[in-house]
Amino acid sequence: MPELPEVETVRRELEKDVKGFTITAAHDLHPRALKPESIAPLKSITGAKILDLKRRGKFLWFVLDRPQVLVAHLGMSGQFLILKNNEPQPKHVRAKFELSKSIRKKELVFNDQRTFGWVSVEETSKGIPSSAQHIAMDPFDPEFDRQETIDKFAKRNIRIKTALLNQEIMSGVGNIYADETLWRAKVHPEISTSDLSKKKIALIIDFAKEVMQEAIAKNGTSFDGAYRKVNGESGSFEESLSAYGRTDEPCPRCGTPIRRIVFGARSSHFCPRCQRKVK
Ligand SMILES: [Zn+2]
């Protein structure tokens, strides 16, 4: 499932591949492709030039030469792919964009097997699309307030894993990077935020940024094969995972087998020796 590093990889690639191109046709090809809150049909962006690609947390958007933006959320398995000449169309294309820049033409598709992803046409406020207004800043945002975020975590009385996944406290972290962050910080996923010192919360925030930074450098994690770069290649961070998906494998720090538990309908992977539940 794409998290911040995967969405950032897609954003960087789209910036390289489609910035400056004009959308000459836009089609949604599945009833769930366009978000119901979209203020206009997808074809309304026909003729728009792509000026920039932006991201907050896991939300991605195309800045256009008009007030509206094209927002995309990859959901569980959404992919933006540029089709090469004569390449057969992928199996689960939900939306299709024909692009041109003078004589150059490109076809960009939004492919999404599990259909939890979506695209939408939206207005912005202070540069942020309406669907991302409720999302907190991610740690890569130049305006990210580390101290304020520490206080937000400390005020809650919920499991730290649940808090890390809450996009309204800090955005960008999903199941993979939450497990990796807590492994690095040596914190058990079920410990309550109110039982953690502010120093420990600060450490967790810093490790979240660090692990995502390292993942971006490796173009993300293609753990379940659902995430692909715009050119169809996978990311390579899964080789660097220490806890996530490593059930029964030795902890890279102490050799104790990694354990998997389920709460909040999500699996959590941790080292029972390095990440003790007792304070
Ligand atoms: Zn360990």
Image: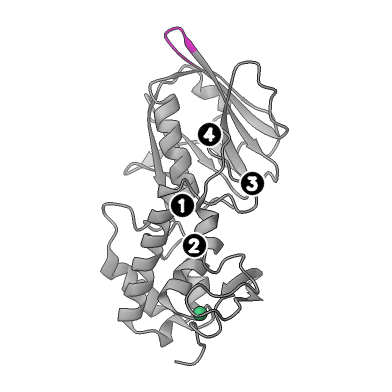
Residue 162's x, y, as percent? Answer: 52, 72
Q: Which residues are magenta?
A: 100-104
Disc number lying in front (1 or 2):
2
Q: Which residue is mark 3?
A: 226
**What amino acid is labelled 2 in the image?**
Tyr
| Crowd rating for badge 3 (residues with CA inside 10 Å; few <14, some 14–19, many 20+) | some
Q: As shown in the figure, which amino acid type bears the numbered disc 3?
A: Ala
Mark toward the viewer: 3 or 1 = 3
Give the numbered dot on residue 177: 2
Work out whether residue 69 can be spotted.
Answer: no
Which residue type carries mark 1? Answer: Leu
> Assess mark 2: CB under 8 A from ligand 1?
no
**How far separated are the C-alphas under marks 4 and 1?**
15 Å
| Residue 105 drawn above or below residue 43 | above
Q: CA distance from mark 1 to mark 2?
A: 9 Å
Disc 4 target residue = 230
